[in-house]
Every structure is written in structure tokens, then in C-alpha cells.
Image (cartoon, rainbow, N blue to C red):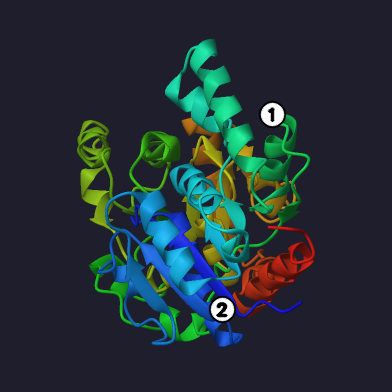
């Protein structure tokens, strides 16, 4: 059975990976001839500019469940994809109130370790148990789940007992077809405007929301330890940790060599001009930033955090893996990689090849194939 009508919902449309991936996925579906809707809380977000006119962007107002119930009854999509727990819950609630002929298939796209939220929030055992049961009850009522990495799939199956529902490990559509054109666009950050040959020292880029889970504080401490006073660091992203990170850079005496430019809708010109991408996260489902850097042949260094980083970097073959929260180890890995870069001892084609499954059309087609595999099951 083919899939012709698919909706995606991200009610809190912010600057994160879910929103970026859903935008790409919608583009891929539309390119493959699928009638596509995006239900979002912020229809004016930068990610949604220049979308294919065939993609219908609808605002989510008021109750998520009420909005979904009305939408599903009116448009009758064949499948609805949600990317955050609050939307997963709303989708299940909304579908329960619809007649059988309107019952759309529900799929949750999980891009993070669900159990990691418990440790991050330091919940007590009772709250952890309650949340585990809530997630399990919700996901058992779905028709399918996609996981961004094998680690995320195993977390769902082993921690939450999601075994009755099909779980597929699918690559996110992170890399657009016009990657090279996007990467060639101007970059107005002065350091990045310079060509590599004209720069006095290496340029390191990091990318992600300025949140504790990204642990950019460890990256700043590692950068301060580098025996490269000519090196510079750009951390692209926005979030609550901005003031604390800026203050830490001042205390470390590196504020003149660190830039926090804020949110950037198109990171590819920035990454393409970098010498190295550094990832310092405490946990990751599978980070877009690493895939984006690999696609451009940019060397990477990453923490061996819980999640899909080790899987993506092929056990460290594509880039060094260091312990979480260890500035010295991260500094050593960055130094080693920059030295290899200077010696032209890096296989950039191998990096690019690792990102191929994350290109727009192959990834979108894999999602469609998964939906088709669910079509024979009752919604």
C-alpha cells in the first residue's frame, strides 16, 4: 500500500534537532509526491522559510489534542508523525475520539534517549517509575516508532518495554540535496569569512542549543588548555546557558578567541569553513551537527556519551571519542586531530561517505517504506 497523505507535528517549534529534521522530512516527502502537512507552534520560524509551497504549514493553537482531533477529522491523513512526548500523548488522545474510518496511523520519531531525561532531571524513583509507565502506556498505543540510532531503539525496548510496537532504526534526513550550494553561501562571521589559507590559526566550531546537556563548559575548558594561542572557537546556538558560558570564557581568559553568534538557520557555510567540529555533549540520540560536519568532510572530535555517537563514528574510526566531562582528554583529541589535519593525514572522502544515508531523499524514502510496512496493521 502506498502512502499519499502524511502529517508531521512539532507543537513547540524551537531551534532544535526535531524541528530541523521534521522540516527536512517534509521536504523529502513533498519531493516524493506525498501530500504533506506540518503542524507547528511557530509558523514564522526561520526553518520554515522557503519551504516547497506544496507543504501546508498549519499553526497549533490551544489544546494540542483538540487541534489534532479537528485536523485528523478534516484532512484524514494516512499517517501522523510526532517528535516530542507531549505531542505523542496528544496524538493518542486525539485519535481515541475519532471514528474507525478516521483513525490515522500514529508514529513517534524518537531522537533522544528517553531514559536520559530521568538522570538529567535527577528525578526520585517514584517520579521515574511514574514517567516510565506513562511513556510505556503511550507508546504501546502507537502503530510504530522510529529511532534515530540503535542505542535509542534499545533504550525504548529495554527500559520502557516497547516490544509490541514495531521499532525501526532510521536515519534522519539531515543532509539536503543542495548541500554544496548552501555551504557556499556567504558567512558574515569575520573569522569564518577568511579562507583557511589566510587564517593565522585553526578554527573550531561547535553547534547546538546552549543547554547543560551539550556541556559547552567542558569545551571551553578544553579550548583554554589547547597549546594553540592562535586557535579560535565559535559555538553556534542559543539557550539559557549563554550568560554562564560567556562568563566562563572571561574567567578562562579566552573571551577574545570565543564567539557565541546565536542561532543560525543554515549552519553549512559555518561548518564548511571550519577546521574541526567539536561535540562535548553528555548524551545524544544522534547529533545532527556530527552528520552535517561529516557530510562536508570536516574532521570531528566527540565525547563518548550515552547514545548514538559511537555508532555514528564507527567506534572512533571516523573521529576521536573522549570521556564525557573531561577537558584534558578533549583538548588532547582536538590537538591530535588538528595535527593530523596539518599533516594532511585525514581521509575526508571516508567522512563524507559515512553521511550518505542521511541525505534527504534516501532518508525520506526509508520513512515511507516503514509506513507502508505498517499499513497492513489495523490503526
- Labelled disc at residue 159: 1
Q: Position of residue 21 (x, y in %)?
A: 50, 63
Q: Position of residue 325 (x, y in %)?
A: 49, 29
Q: Quadrant of residue 77?
A: bottom right
Q: Is residue 231 visible?
A: no
Q: Position of residue 91 (x, y in %)?
A: 50, 51
Q: Secondary structure at mark 1?
A: loop
The front one of 330 and 33 is 33
Q: Quadrant of residue 161?
A: top right
The front one of 17 and 241 is 17
At horizontal 53% and vertical 64% (from top left) the residue drawn is 293
Circle 1 Cα neighbour tier, 10 Å, few/some/many (<14 / 14–19 / ≥20): few
Q: Is residue 191 visible?
A: yes
Count the labels in the image: 2
- Which sits earlier in the primary sequence, circle 2 or circle 1? 2
In which quadrant is the C terminus drawn?
A: bottom right
Residue position marked by numbered label 2 in the rendering = 28
- Labelled disc at residue 216: none
* Residue positioned most to the front: 99
58 to 237, vertically: above or below:
below
Report, in whole angstroms, how far the alpha carbon at label 2 lies from the one at label 1: 32 Å
Q: Is residue 80 left or right of residue 248?
A: right
Q: Secondary structure at mark 2?
A: helix
Q: Position of residue 321 (x, y in %)?
A: 63, 42
Circle 2 Cα neighbour tier, 10 Å, few/some/many (<14 / 14–19 / ≥20): many
Amino acid at each position: 500500500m502506498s502512502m499519499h497523505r502524511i502529517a508531521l507535528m512539532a507543537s513547540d517549534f524551537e531551534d532544535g534537532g526535531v524541528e530541523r529534521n521534521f522540516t527536512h522530512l517534509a521536504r523529502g516527502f513533498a519531493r516524493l509526491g506525498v501530500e504533506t502537512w506540518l503542524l507547528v507552534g511557530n509558523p514564522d520560524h526561520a526553518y520554515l522559510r522557503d519551504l516547497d509551497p506544496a507543504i501546508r504549514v498549519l499553526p497549533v493553537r490551544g489544546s494540542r489534542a483538540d487541534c489534532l482531533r479537528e485536523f485528523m477529522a478534516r484532512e484524514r491523513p494516512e499517517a501522523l508523525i510526532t517528535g516530542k512526548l507531549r505531542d505523542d500523548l496528544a496524538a493518542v488522545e486525539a485519535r481515541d475520539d475519532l471514528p474507525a474510518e478516521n483513525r490515522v496511523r500514529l508514529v513517534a520519531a524518537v531522537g533522544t534517549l528517553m531514559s536520559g531525561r530521568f538522570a538529567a532531571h535527577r528525578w526520585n524513583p517514584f517520579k521515574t517509575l511514574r514517567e516510565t509507565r506513562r511513556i510505556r502506556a503511550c507508546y504501546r498505543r502507537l502503530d510504530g516508532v522510529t529511532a534515530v540510532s540503535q542505542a535509542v531503539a534499545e533504550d525504548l525496548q529495554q527500559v520502557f518495554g516497547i516490544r509490541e510496537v514495531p521499532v525501526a532504526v532510521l536515519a534522519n534526513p539531515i543532509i539536503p540535496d543542495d548541500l554544496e550550494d548552501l555551504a557556499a553561501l556567504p558567512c558574515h562571521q569575520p573569522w569564518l569569512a577568511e579562507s583557511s589559507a589566510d587564517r593565522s590559526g585553526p578554527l573550531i566550531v561547535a553547534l547546538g542549543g546552549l543547554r547543560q546537556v551539550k556541556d559547552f563548559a567542558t569545551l571551553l575548558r578544553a579550548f583554554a588548555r589547547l597549546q594553540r594561542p592562535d586557535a579560535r572557537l565559535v559555538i553556534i546556538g542559543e539557550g539559557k546557558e549563554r550568560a554562564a558560558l560567556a562568563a566562563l570564557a572571561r574567567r578562562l581568559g579566552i573571551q577574545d578567541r570565543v564567539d557565541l553568534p546565536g542561532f543560525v538557520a543554515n549552519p553549512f557555510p559555518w561548518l564548511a569553513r571550519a577546521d574541526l567540529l567539536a561535540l562535548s555533549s553528555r548524551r545524544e540520540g544522534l547529533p545532527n551537527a556530527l552528520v552535517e560536519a561529516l557530510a562536508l568532510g570536516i574532521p570531528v572530535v566527540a565525547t563518548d556519551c550515552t547514545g548514538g555517537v559511537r555508532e555514528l563514528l564507527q567506534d572512533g574510526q571516523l573521529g576521536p571519542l573522549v570521556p564525557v566531562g573531561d577537558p584534558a582528554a578533549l583538548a588532547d583529541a582536538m590537538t591530535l586531530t588538528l595535527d593530523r589535519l596539518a599533516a594532511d593525514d585525514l581521509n575526508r572522502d571516508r567522512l563524507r561517505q559515512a553521511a550518505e544515508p542521511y541525505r534527504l531523499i534516501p532518508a525520506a524514502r526509508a520513512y515511507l517504506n516503514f509506513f507502508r510496512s505498517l499499513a497492513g496493521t489495523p490503526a
